[in-house]
Image (spheres, rainbow, N blue to C red):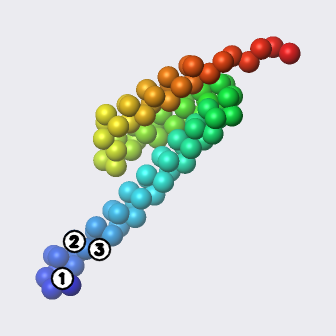
């Protein structure tokens, strides 16, 4: 256990930041899950719109320091590839 006031303060700050960062990561995962579900359903338009919404969340995670820039870019690229490979729905 910390004895110095500065060490106690550091523990408090770390707990606060950990909670905030966990919330950010959870939020990003939720948005990515929506993209994944749309891709699995085969709905190209829904997947595309979900990716458009998830993209700023991923980049926000990068600026806040919870994700590495290359990780975010790789995820976006792979999702975009998968969405592009989905077949277009024929008109009824």
Tell me whether the residue at label 2 lies in contact with that at label 1, contact meaning CB atoms closer than 8 angstroms.
yes
Q: What kind of element bears circle 3?
A: helix
**Chain-order first, disc 1 or disc 3:** 1
Tell me how far mark 1 sits from mark 3, CA to CA: 11 Å
Q: What kind of element bears circle 1?
A: loop
Q: What percent of the width, then of the height, locates residue 3?
A: 15, 85
Q: Which residue is mark 3?
A: 12
Compared with 25, 7 (above or below) is: below
Compared with 75, 45 (above or below) is: above
Tell me how far mark 3 sits from mark 2, CA to CA: 5 Å
Compared with 65, 40 (above or below) is: above
Q: Which residue is mark 2?
A: 10
Residue at 54% in and 25% down:
82
Q: What kind of element bears circle 2?
A: helix
Query: Among all residues in the image, which is located at the extreme right?
Result: 92
Q: Which residue is mark 1?
A: 2
Q: Specify the quadrant of the image occupied by residue 68.
A: top left
Considering depth in this image, is 44 or 18 the residue closer to the camera? 44
Compared with 57, 15 (above or below) is: below
**Chain-order first, disc 2 or disc 1:** 1
Q: Is residue 63 visible?
A: no
Front of the two marks 1 and 3: 1
Tell me how far mark 2 sits from mark 1, CA to CA: 9 Å
């Amino acid at each position: 256990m910390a004895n110095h006031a500065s060490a106690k303060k550091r523990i408090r700050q770390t707990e606060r930041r950990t909670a905030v960062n966990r919330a950010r990561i959870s939020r990003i995962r939720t948005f990515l899950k929506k993209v994944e579900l749309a891709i699995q359903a085969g709905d190209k338009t829904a997947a595309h719109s979900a990716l458009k919404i998830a993209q700023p969340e991923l980049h926000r995670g990068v600026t806040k320091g919870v994700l590495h820039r290359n990780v975010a870019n790789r995820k976006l690229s792979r999702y975009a590839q998968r969405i592009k490979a989905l077949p277009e729905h024929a008109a009824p």
